[in-house]
Image (cartoon, grey):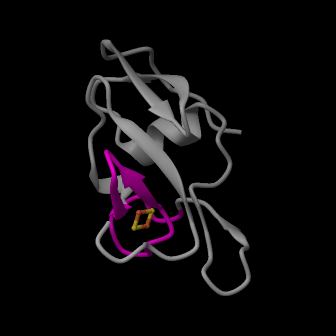
Amino acid sequence: MFKRLADAGAAVAITVDGKPVAARSGDTVAAALLAAGIDHCRTTPVTGAPRAPYCLMGVCFECLVTVDGVGSRQGCLIPVCEGMKVETQIGKREAGR
Ligand code: FES
């Protein structure tokens, strides 16, 4: 569904739910997930419905993910970095994470 307009930026290796994903420097986490064909980054706490990044500018909070063990991070505002561990978020964030 999404594809890069240009092949700019150096390769950055991240993992998403334990699987390797090839991102590019300058990508946000949300952009890297979309470019990799990952169709949702969280599920809702109430119904479990899948949600995907929507605004890509920090307004809608649909892009919440766990990044390096910290939950409820806005993926559209966090640039990828080498070795980053991203997990899709199931429901609400656990207390203390
Ligand atoms: S996509 Fe809307 S806040 Fe991240």
Name of the residue lying farthest toward the front = 96
- Residue found 45% across the figure and 19% down from its top: 6
> Would you place residue 89 above or below residue 79 in this image?
below
- Residue found 27% across the figure and 49% down from its top: 78
Magenta-colored stretch includes residue 63: yes
49 vs 68, left or right, is right
Indicate the quadrant where residue 68 lies: top left
Q: Nearer the viewer, residue 4 or 14?
A: 14
> Would you place residue 75 above or below residue 19 in this image?
below
41 vs 69, left or right, is right
Q: Tell me residue 73's x, y (percent).
A: 33, 61
- Magenta residue span: 54-73
Q: Tell me residue 3's x, y (percent).
A: 60, 30
- Residue found 59% across the figure and 31% down from its top: 36
91 vs 28, left or right, is right
Magenta-colored stretch includes residue 5: no
Total count of labels: 0
Q: Tell me residue 54's x, y (percent).
A: 53, 64
Query: In terms of image quarters, where does ligand 1 lie?
Result: bottom left
Image quadrant where one finds the C terminus: bottom left
Magenta segment main secondary structure: loop
Image quadrant where one finds the N terminus: top right
Q: Nearer the viewer, residue 63 or 8?
A: 63
